[in-house]
Structure formats: C-alpha cells, structure tokens
Image (spheres, helix red, strand yellow):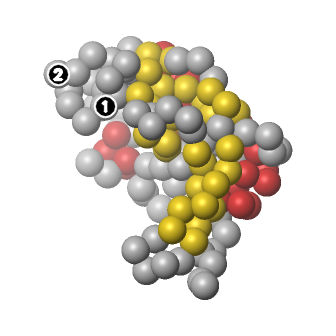
C-alpha cells in the first residue's frame, strides 16, 4: 500500500502512533517508499516506536510480537559475494541473529522474538559511511 494512502485521515485502522511511525519511515523527499532513515537517531527512534506498539511480527502475522531485546556487541567484518567481491558488513557472535542493515544496525532473533540495537566500537555516522562503501574487487 502506498504511504500516501496510509497517511489518509480516513484510514481509521491507523492510530496516531502509527502515523508518527510512518512519518519516521518516509523516504527521501520524492520517494513514497517507507524505509529507515539514514540518520542513526531517527532509525533508532523508528525501530523503538515500532516495537513499542506490540504489533511488530517477523514474517508471519500469526507469530508472537517482536519485543525490544538488549543491545548486543557487534563488529564490522567482511563478506565475500558470489562474484568474489568483498563488502563491509556488521557481524554478531550469535549466528541465529539476523542483522538489519541501516544507519544504526539492529538485530532480530526470530526464534526468541527479540530485536535490539547493535553496539559497535565506531561512531554511528562512520558506521553508515563504512556500510555504504562500494565492494572491493580482488
């Protein structure tokens, strides 16, 4: 559903909290696609507000809601693509965690129904720059 329809005041199924979250997820000026902001603070705020609704699910509406989990320590690492190019990525020790790439990386552990921020030993503005770096060819 286009975000313009979601902002329609006649959409009675949306709460004021939902509308505020949609505003946080608005893409850049001309885009109607909903996405996390490139601003780390805004991305964190959007994630926390979505989880606070108690209606965030992972891939199945019948699954339990995802709750806010503890921050987890992570690091930057390298991932080798199928074409041999190397890309910077966020890594966690917990292999069951799925990393949500954004200006402020978060994890989801579907089996535990938890999501939370990933703490890195790098200022968040630099994390965004590192993750946006082009792949390195051998």
- On residue 75, which mark appears? none
Res. 38 in view: no
Residue at the spot of label 1: 58
**Seen in the image, is 76 located left or right of residue 68?**
right
Residue closer to the observer: 12 or 97: 97
Which residue is pictured at 43% across the width and 57% down the height?
32
Would you identify the image quadrant in which residue 110 lies? top left
Which residue is pictured at 49% across the width and 42% down the height?
99
The quadrant of the picture occupied by the C terminus is bottom right
Residue at the spot of label 2: 62
**Residue with the most extreme bottom position:** 138
How many numbered tags mark residues here? 2
Badge 1, how many Cα within 10 Å: few under 14, some, many 20+? Answer: some
Badge 2, how many Cα within 10 Å: few under 14, some, many 20+? Answer: few
Q: Is residue 48 above or below residue 87?
A: above
Which residue is pictured at 37% across the width and 20% down the height?
113
Q: Is residue 32 above or below residue 48?
A: below
Residue closer to the observer: 79 or 98: 79
Residue closer to the observer: 79 or 29: 79
**Residue with the most extreme left position:** 62
SS class of the residue under badge 1? loop
Q: Position of residue 109 (x, y in %)?
A: 41, 28
Q: CA distance from mark 2 to mark 1?
A: 9 Å
SS class of the residue under badge 2? loop
Q: Position of residue 76 (x, y in %)?
A: 67, 51
């Amino acid at each position: 559903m286009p975000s313009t329809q979601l902002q329609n005041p006649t959409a009675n199924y949306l709460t004021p909290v939902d509308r505020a979250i949609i505003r946080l997820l608005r893409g850049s000026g001309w885009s109607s696609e909903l996405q996390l902001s490139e601003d780390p603070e805004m991305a964190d705020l959007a994630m926390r507000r979505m989880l606070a609704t108690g209606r965030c699910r992972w891939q199945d509406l019948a699954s339990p809601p995802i709750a806010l989990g503890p921050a987890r320590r992570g690091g930057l690492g390298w991932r080798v693509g199928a074409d041999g190019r190397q890309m910077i990525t966020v890594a966690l020790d917990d292999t069951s965690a799925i990393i949500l790439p954004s200006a402020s990386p978060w994890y989801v552990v579907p089996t535990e129904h938890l999501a939370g921020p990933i703490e890195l030993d790098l200022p968040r503005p630099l994390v965004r720059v590192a993750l946006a770096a082009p792949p390195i060819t051998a």
